[in-house]
Image (tube, rainbow, N blue to C red):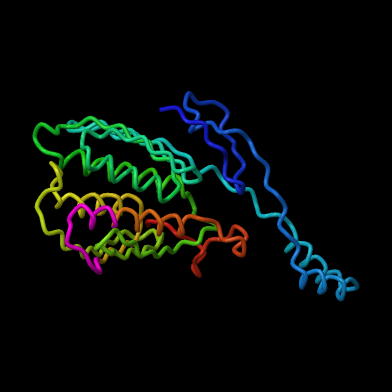
Amino acid sequence: MELCVPPHPCVIRTNSCSSSHLLNPSPRVLLPTTHHPLVSISRRNMQKCSSASSTIKALDSPMDTVRDRIVSVKRVTNETNVVVELNLDGVGSPNSTTGIPFLDHMLDQLASHGLFDVHVKAVGDTHIDDHHTNEDVGLAIGTALLNALGDRKGINRFGDFTAPLDEALVHVALDLSGRPHLSYDLQIPTERVGTYDTQLVEHFFQSMVNTSGMTLHIRQLAGKNSHHIIEATFKAFARALRQAIEYDPRRRGTVPSSKGVLSRS
């Protein structure tokens, strides 16, 4: 799974060695923030006040260095062997082979519409059914997301998106709060899409929520076709997650919480 990915403009890469290009991007230096005209005016008016001048100078300094958001996670049990490589600041590169074709298709939506690089390789006991592999892929992706976000400093934290797909319309809202919770309200009319058991959609998201520390609400507003409903869900989730993980320059690297910390404990 090799991929050459340009780094996010707000990220300084620090990985020194790796066999994967996804895990070893080229270094890049932060650009200074643009001076706001009102800040410049205040600065001129307050030059004689040293404390105020120091404050303005601090506001003009570039955003603090942001950590890498590229991780690799391996989950091995008696039932499955799953490897996930995730780059939150990627270009939307999908590369998933889970042994569950419909799940691969949905993970492609996650990568493409979230602009994440999502590389998943999984081998599991699909000769029994898809349950264990579907679950462990969700758990591994959630763990990768948890590790990539780190202390969650500077991010938007919240995401909200409604995605249509023909007659289907699905709304997703999420909070990277550190508190796992799933509210799931899809009415999928068939038991299967191809060979994929549609009950596994909820189980995938529940597994990912549990390990990522995410509050996630999924609500179907319209839809009759099972494939459309599920695909609209993954697209809406991808766009909402993209909103939540992106950096808010006004936060200047602080944790988006009045408590000063976002964690799963």
x 44%, y 43%: residue:
92
Q: 68 or 37, which lies in front? A: 37
Q: Is 68 situated above or below 34?
A: above
Residue 216 picture quarter: bottom left
Residue 164 picture quarter: bottom left
Q: Position of residue 134 (x, y in %)?
A: 21, 42
Q: Position of residue 168 (x, y in %)?
A: 25, 62
Q: Which residues are magenta?
A: 220-232
Number of labels in the image equals 0
Q: Position of residue 174 (x, y in %)?
A: 37, 63
Q: Is residue 83 visible?
A: yes
Locate the N terminus by quadrant: top left
Q: Is residue 228 magenta?
A: yes
Tell which residue pokes out farthest to the right in this image.
48
Q: Position of residue 88 (x, y in %)?
A: 47, 46
Residue 213 picture quarter: bottom left
Q: 188 or 81, which lies in front? A: 188
x 46%, y 50%: residue:
149
Tell which residue pokes out farthest to the top in this image.
19
Q: Is residue 73 visible?
A: no
Q: 39 or 197, which lies in front? A: 197
x 42%, y 57%: residue:
263
Q: Is residue 224 magenta?
A: yes
* Left or right: 189 in relation to 252: left
Locate the C terminus by quadrant: bottom left
Q: 216 or 78, which lies in front? A: 216
Q: Is 248 situated above or below 129?
A: below
